[in-house]
Amino acid sequence: MRITDVTLHGVQTPRRYATVCAAPGGGADATVECSRHYLLELHTDVGLTGIGEVSDVEMVPVYTPGYVPPRDALLETYRWWLVGRDPFDRGRLHAERPLNGLAAAAADMAVHDLLGKAAGVPVYKLLGGMTNPRPLLCWVAFIRDDLRALREELAEKVAAGFRAFKLKVGVDLDLDDERLAVAREVAGPHAELKIDASGAWDVPGAIAAIERLQRHGLAGVETPVPVGQVEDLAAVRRAVDVMILEHANEFELALRMIRADAVDVINTYVGGVGGIYPLIKMLALCEAAQVGVLLGSTLELGVGTAAQLHVAASTATLALSSDLIGPAMYTDDVITEPFVYADSTLRIPQGPGLGVELDRDKLEQLAWPGV
Ligand SMILES: [Mg+2]
């Protein structure tokens, strides 16, 4: 099988509400009302088409520093990289990849979609088979100062079956304390509650905040200090009695955190590490180091969520709930059978490849010309 051409569709999807997180070092980060994505198709000489997704393209600079790929440049890069190649050569494709993070992940998803379709099996079968049929997913509640709106949001999610939640915190400690009280009350005593401070705190601030917020029964605290400040993270972890969670999109950062005993659970995901293939290596690294793992998110559409679900379904070692909320946070999706949450999880697609199909009408309705 050879890849013969690449197509790229830009789409934009509003979020259900304007989302706010803390900024690294403190204060509030930019409000996000709408996300833009590229859907990638890889065409082949055997008539199969593989699909992938650059989820939330504004996030791409985070993973490819200083570089926002314009649509045409991105398409040309994909063509240069992938046309003429055999999608079975995953190792070589990754070794020679000219893109990182979300942009590389889109190609990797489409490659896995092709391999699954060629073999007539869902992608999870290529990754070790079904070991985790009902991966626990949490609802992520962004920072809102309207406690009534938060209560409504969480009550709706509890009614929809969610029993794990992550609250973004870090802008206003008093508000965080009140929000967590609402979350615990609405979600009940047994719900898993994580918080994510997005790096807003310094070491003493993190310790004080965690000691105060811990009364709500926290399953984990993510990114208490800015990502990459490994010694600070280790200092926070030594001082508190709650699991510390941190993102790692590069092996080097994961190793530094493991060596410094800085982390209990590593948050990693398909888009962050550049695809399913490198993610499987990251999961193996965490397993060998006996560090927990959960799947994070940059708010994927249905294609990116499917890719993550295949990894989740074949990973028996997920330590805490994973953050795959894209399909419920956007008002629309681009797949023919959008995902529906039930019992704090999503069904694992069973069709060949990623098991989801692009809805051509949606691609047109949601079209975005790209940068
Ligand atoms: Mg996070």
Image (cartoon, grey):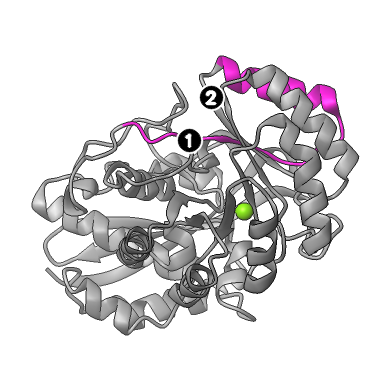
In the image, is 154 to the left or to the right of 174?
Answer: left
- Whether label 1 touches label 2, CB < 8 Å: yes
Q: Residue at x 45, y 78 (%)?
A: 99
Q: Position of residue 157 (x, y in %)?
A: 60, 23
Residue 259 versus residue 329 in the image, above or below: below
Residue 240 versus residue 275 in the image, above or below: above
Q: Is the C terminus in the top left, top right, bottom left or bottom right quadrant?
A: bottom right
Which amino acid type is marked by label 1? Leu
- Distance, label 1 to label 2, CA atoms, is 8 Å
Q: Which residue is mark 2?
A: 162
Q: Is residue 137 magenta?
A: yes
Q: Residue at x 48, y 43 (%)?
A: 322
Q: Which residue is mark 1?
A: 137
In the image, is 293 to the left or to the right of 329?
Answer: left
In the structure shown, which secondary structural element does the residue marked by tag 2 occupy?
loop
Q: Position of residue 158 (x, y in %)?
A: 59, 19
Which amino acid type is marked by label 2? Phe
Q: Position of residue 163 (x, y in %)?
A: 53, 24
Res 41 visible: no
In the structure shown, which secondary structural element does the residue marked by tag 1 occupy?
loop
Res 73 visible: yes
Q: Is the N terminus in the top left, top right, bottom left or bottom right quadrant?
A: bottom left
In the image, is 295 to the left or to the right of 202?
Answer: left
Residue 179 versus residue 365 in the image, above or below: above
**Nearest to the observer: residue 105 or residue 196:** 196
Of pointers 1 and 2, the one earlier in the residue sequence: 1
Mark 1 sits near ligand 1, with its Cβ under 8 Å away: no
Residues drawn in magenta: 134-159
* Residue count near mark 1 (Cα–Cα under 10 Å), binned few <14, some 14–19, many ≥20: many
Q: Which mark is residue 255?
A: none
Q: Would you identify the image quadrant in which residue 66 lies?
A: bottom right
Q: Position of residue 11 (x, y in %)?
A: 54, 52
